[in-house]
Image (cartoon, helix red, strand yellow):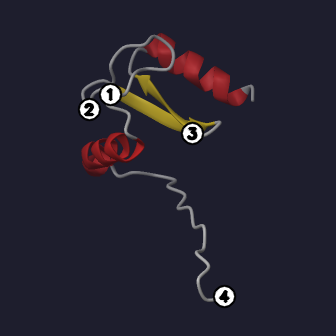
Amino acid sequence: MEEGRVMDMKEVIKIVYHKEVGNFLESLIRHEKLGEATCYICGTKVTLENFMALTRKSGRILFCCNKIECYRSFNDILRNE
């Protein structure tokens, strides 16, 4: 690597252990400056109590709450891309 160049490194997180979800969500919200995470499908505020899934799409982080209708729609959207 040339002196003065910075490598652009991205870490891919494939799984988060259930005991670490709280820390992961808090750091993600802080890092992304989201303020508050909302469900991509219904707009409900996503908390540790109702968090089901997340993904990155077009540079945005999308969250899904634990409502079964939201989870099904969220998965359908991801599968159809």
Q: Residue 36 bears which disc, if any?
A: 1
Amino acid bearing label 4: Glu
Upstream in sequence: badge 3 or badge 2: 2
Q: Quadrant of residue 36?
A: top left
Q: Is residue 51 above or below residue 25?
A: above
Q: Which residue is mark 4?
A: 2
**Toward the viewer: 4 or 61?**
4
For marks 4 and 3, give the one nearer the viewer.
4
Q: Residue 64 bears which disc, if any?
A: none
Spatial CA distance of label 4 from label 3 is: 31 Å
Amino acid bearing label 1: Glu
Q: Is residue 81 above or below residue 68?
A: below
Residue 75 coordinates in the image, percent (x, y): 60, 25
Upstream in sequence: badge 4 or badge 2: 4
Amino acid bearing label 3: Arg
Spatial CA distance of label 4 from label 2 is: 43 Å
Measuring 49% from the left and 11% from the top, which residue is drawn there?
A: 69
Q: Which residue is mark 2?
A: 48
**Toward the viewer: 42 or 33?**
33
Q: Which residue is mark 3?
A: 56
Q: Are marks 4 and 3 in contact (CB under 8 Å)?
A: no
